[in-house]
Image (cartoon, grey):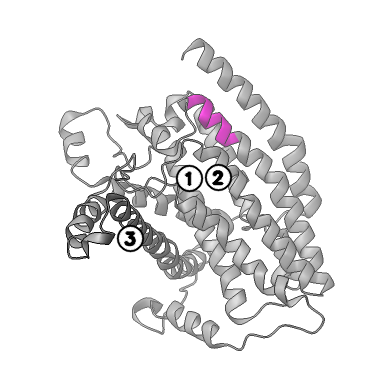
Amino acid sequence: MFVPSVTNPIGDFVREWVPKLAEYLPAAIQSDTLNSVVAFLVNAVICVIAVCLVNIGSAPILIYMERKVCAHVQCRMGPMRLGWHGTIQTIADVLKMLFKEVYAPGGVDKFVYFLAPLIVLIAPFMVAALIPFGENLLVANIDMGIPLIIAINGFGVLGILLGGWSSNNKYSLLGALRSGAQMISYEISFALVLLFVVMISGSTNLMAITQTQSGTIFDWTIFRVPVLGIIAFVLFFISSTAEMNRAPFDIAEAEQELTGGYHTEYNGTPFAMFYLAEYIALVTNSSLAVTCFLGGFHAPCLGIAAVDGVLTMIPGVVWFFAKVFFMIWAYMMVRWTFVRPRVDQLMSFEWKFLLPLNLLMLVAGAAYVALVG
């Protein structure tokens, strides 16, 4: 029977009970191979449901959270009328968007037009399947996890370019081209930062990267490598913000210039899918930052036995999501604090400053590994 490298109590339960239930089938069709395939498929369905619950379930929470963070940064109240402190406002907005009429403007390529939002959603869902949320909470334990994530991120660029091109609207096309140029440029720095993490940890497997940070907070990548770890974390934060097209790097959606950017002509459910993809990417990038720099699901131990004993009593998945929501809060604070740069300033910042600095970081990281180990 197929047994994954990272086992889970639920998966073990399924693999134990499938052969017992198979005993009620006719003897002619009973086999260990069939039991293994059925158990694998059942566990696969459970994993898909779990990933969907984490991603789709977190979106309404993050929309409400962003509204409140935005309001308090700007000395406002935010939604307050529907439910306690406006907690039902997001649900009302989601229902309204789902029931709106879906139509395509004249002259569009309808197949590509409706395919583009689906492509944009692929990348964050696939990345979420690679993230270790806990010691036994991992969908796909792949040795080449980091290179796969770097490759998957290209799907988002493709979907945005197709959406803008197929809309038969010059503003949408300009927004898509600006977005594509920005995302491709900043994905280079994004990939180089992840390669720095691979160099320091000695593995491309996300679970292995997390396990190298076990111990105290001084074993986390951000603190383990003096100075370089903090710089790498800041570079990851900047490049991932630009890669997600979030403010202040949202030049693809500059309302003053492009009326809305690549999704100007989208409405109803297709627009909701673009909107959903942004928040799922926020979760996955925050999860990736936690996994690579902030110790993953490990507790923030201080090296004091009495304190560490209390901290380790809390499940790792709780620590993981606490760190994830801290990262999400940081992304939101940056969005509502800094002004949007011009498109030429944004691209110059990547090619003239961020990219050379990332290359220097790789050299410095290699020197650190060679000298310190």
Q: Is tag 2's residue or tag 3's residue first in the polypeptide sequence?
A: 3
**Coordinates of residue 347 in the picture (x, y in percent):** 77, 46
Identify the disc placed on residue 42: 3
**Coordinates of residue 62 in the picture (x, y in percent):** 45, 65
Instruction: Decide: is 217 above or below 47.
Output: above
Q: How many marks?
A: 3
Q: Is tag 3's residue or tag 1's residue first in the polypeptide sequence?
A: 3
Amino acid type indicated by mark 3: Val
Residue for badge 2: 149
Magenta-drawn stretch, dominant element (helix, strand or loop): helix
Q: Quadrant of residue 108?
A: bottom right
Identify the disc placed on residue 71: none
Is 6 included in the stretch rendered in magenta? no
How packed is label 3: few (under 14 Cα within 10 Å), some, or many (20 or more)?
A: some
Instruction: List the single residue furthest toward the top.
Output: 371
Who's the residue at 66% across and 44% down the image? 187
Is 198 included in the stretch rendered in magenta? yes
Residue for badge 1: 288
Q: Look at the image and give the residue range highlighted in magenta.
A: 193-200
Q: Are marks 1 and 2 in contact (CB under 8 Å)?
A: yes
Q: Is residue 314 left or right of residue 207?
A: left
Observer-nearest of 303 and 55: 55
Q: Is residue 157 left or right of residue 169?
A: left
Who's the residue at 56% across and 22% down the image? 365
Q: CA distance from mark 3 to mark 1?
A: 27 Å
How packed is label 1: few (under 14 Cα within 10 Å), some, or many (20 or more)?
A: many
